[in-house]
Image (cartoon, rainbow, N blue to C red):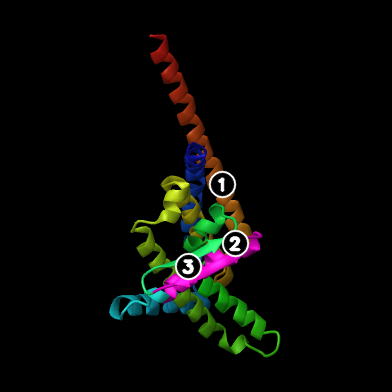
Amino acid sequence: MKLLKFLTGLLLLPPCIALSQALWDLIMEIHPESAWVLPAPAIALLAGLGLWLVLYYALPRPVQSYILAHELTHALWGTLMGAEIFSIRVHRDHGAVELSKNNFLITLAPYFFPLYTILAVTGYYALGMFVDVKAYLLFWLATVGLTWGFHLTFTISALSQHQTDIQQHGHLFSYAVIYLCNVLGICIWIVMVTSVTLEMLVSTMQEHMTAVSSIVYEFAVKGIATAREFLAD
């Protein structure tokens, strides 16, 4: 199983490269409202992210809040996949959740699923069913940026330490899945708050995936040919 996941991780590297290139293309396609200013929704999103970075480095870090989100995300994804929750424990510097079943999505979910951001998005649209919340759009986007910054910084911090979640499924496979999901999330936010469209995201991803696959194929063919020549000698 570890070998299979390692090989799967290798196969995920080309999509990682293609999606990274697609993200750069989307950023270059953003049309500002003036010569110097990004669209207001994008500014609000970045302002929230910037505010979180200031708080993260200037104030004591809310580690326990991250641990709570981490364990709740395990529990949420476990529930969605039919697992029974036996217990959830959250302490000042560690936590744990016991489930009746497990898989790589349940294990890796906290690293690519920004729980507090999802709660902010869900709360905004749920409230919008009863009252007009359009006037608070920019404030909400700033909140989304702040909570996503929370997810990003703590995810990077967690991955820089020993994590049994990562060891369980192998480093290459785990990092590839986490990277793909997070970069895809950034692409989706760009589509939501700028002039970039979903069609542009899909088309540029297909274009880069085709190009990367072609390079990988040529490299593989040359590698096999070289190996055959070596064995023949």
Seen at 29% across and 80% down, the residue is: 58
Q: Nearer the viewer, mark 1 or mark 2?
A: 2
Q: Residues within 10 Å of mark 3 (few under 14, many from 20)?
A: many
| Residue marked by disc 3 | 70
* In this picture, residue 159 sits left or right of residue 186: left
Circles 3 and 1, Cβ within 8 Å, touching? The answer is no
Could you tell me which quadrant the C terminus lies in? top left
Residue at 46% over, 19% down: 225
Name which of mark 1 and mark 2 comes first in the sequence: 2
Query: Of 195 and 219, which appears nearest the observer?
Result: 219
Outermost front residue? 86
For the view shown, which residue lies furthest in the right direction?
129
Q: What is the crowding at mark 1: few (fewer than 14 residues within 10 Å), some, or many (at least 20)?
A: few
**How many marks on residues?**
3
- x and y percent of residue 51 in the render? 38, 80
For the residues marked 3 and 1, what is the alpha-carbon distance in whole angstroms?
35 Å
Which residue is at 56% across, 55% downward? 105
Instruction: First in sequence, mark 3 or 1: give its number.
Output: 3
Q: Name the residue under label 1.
A: 207
Which residue is labeled 2 in the image? 78
Q: What stretch is highlighted in magenta?
A: 65-91
